[in-house]
Amino acid sequence: MTEFSVQQTIKRWLSHKQENSIIDVGNFARLYDQNYLIVFRYVYGLIGGTRQDVEDITAETFMRAWSTRHRFSGNEQAALGWLLRIARNLVIDVSRRKKFRVVDDSVEVKTLLDASAVPEDDLVTREQTAILWKVLSGLPDAMREMLVLRYMLGWQIKQIAVHLDMTENNVSANIRRALSRLQRDFLQLEGE
């Protein structure tokens, strides 16, 4: 099932729901459109796995969000944090049942990168990203999540600290440690 068909299936399902809740179908569809790729990148960053596994978890995230939307209140930033918490819980549940940590070549690098990147940097970025995914799989889950939030989703340290219920200093120290470890492992892999 392609990403487009997954999105269309979810949108069709959402359009058939008729609820008088705080988040109506139109608002939820907009939330979906704005955050699908962010949640997909987040899930992929946490577990790797096959494209199908990542799409399934991403779709399940939005399904659970839809079914519990009446309990949510907040702005767009809070909604993204809420979606990522749902996704993290699903990743934890799935990880308990099976191990992913396999980089799937069918996930196009352009799906994981910032669309506004300069084209001249694209080739180098693609090569480095492929190596980086291999190195990321060796990090502990908590460090990996911080790096995904910081560098794949572009969150500030303060946002990460709030989201993970940690101090900013703790987040910064963990990211520095993770980057040092990544640099060491990256240089080893790049040299091979």
Image: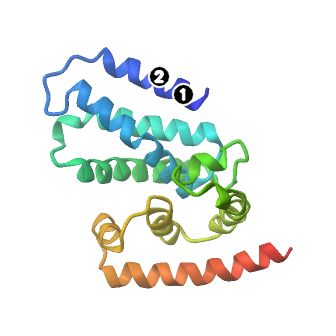
Residue that lies at the very extreme toward the right in this rendered image: 192
Residue marked by disc 1: 4
Q: Quadrant of residue 188?
A: bottom right
Q: Measured from the top left, where is residue 187 in percent x and y?
A: 74, 79
CA distance for labels 2 and 1: 6 Å
Q: Tag count in the figure?
A: 2
Q: Residues within 10 Å of mark 1 (few under 14, many from 20)?
A: few
Residue at image x 58%, y 46%?
A: 111
Tell me if residue 89 comes above or below residue 188 in the rendering.
above
Secondary-structure class at tag 1: helix
Q: Nearer the viewer, residue 137 or 176?
A: 176
Q: Measured from the top left, where is residue 40 in percent x and y?
A: 50, 45
Residue that lies at the very extreme toward the top in this rendered image: 16
Q: Nearer the viewer, residue 77 or 45?
A: 77
Q: Is residue 177 left or right of residue 136?
A: left
Q: Which mark is residue 8?
A: 2
Secondary-structure class at tag 2: helix
Q: Amino acid at mark 2?
A: Gln
Q: Is residue 37 left or right of residue 78?
A: right
Quarter of the image with the N terminus is top right
Q: Measured from the top left, where is residue 60 in percent x and y?
A: 43, 36
Q: Is residue 140 left or right of residue 74?
A: right
Q: Measured from the top left, where is residue 104 in percent x and y?
A: 70, 48
Label pair 2/1, CB-CB below 8 angstroms: yes
Q: Which mark is residue 179?
A: none
Q: Nearer the viewer, residue 43 or 141?
A: 43
Q: Quadrant of residue 128?
A: bottom right
Q: Residues within 10 Å of mark 2 (few under 14, many from 20)?
A: few
Q: Amino acid at mark 1?
A: Phe
Residue at image x 34%, y 85%?
A: 169
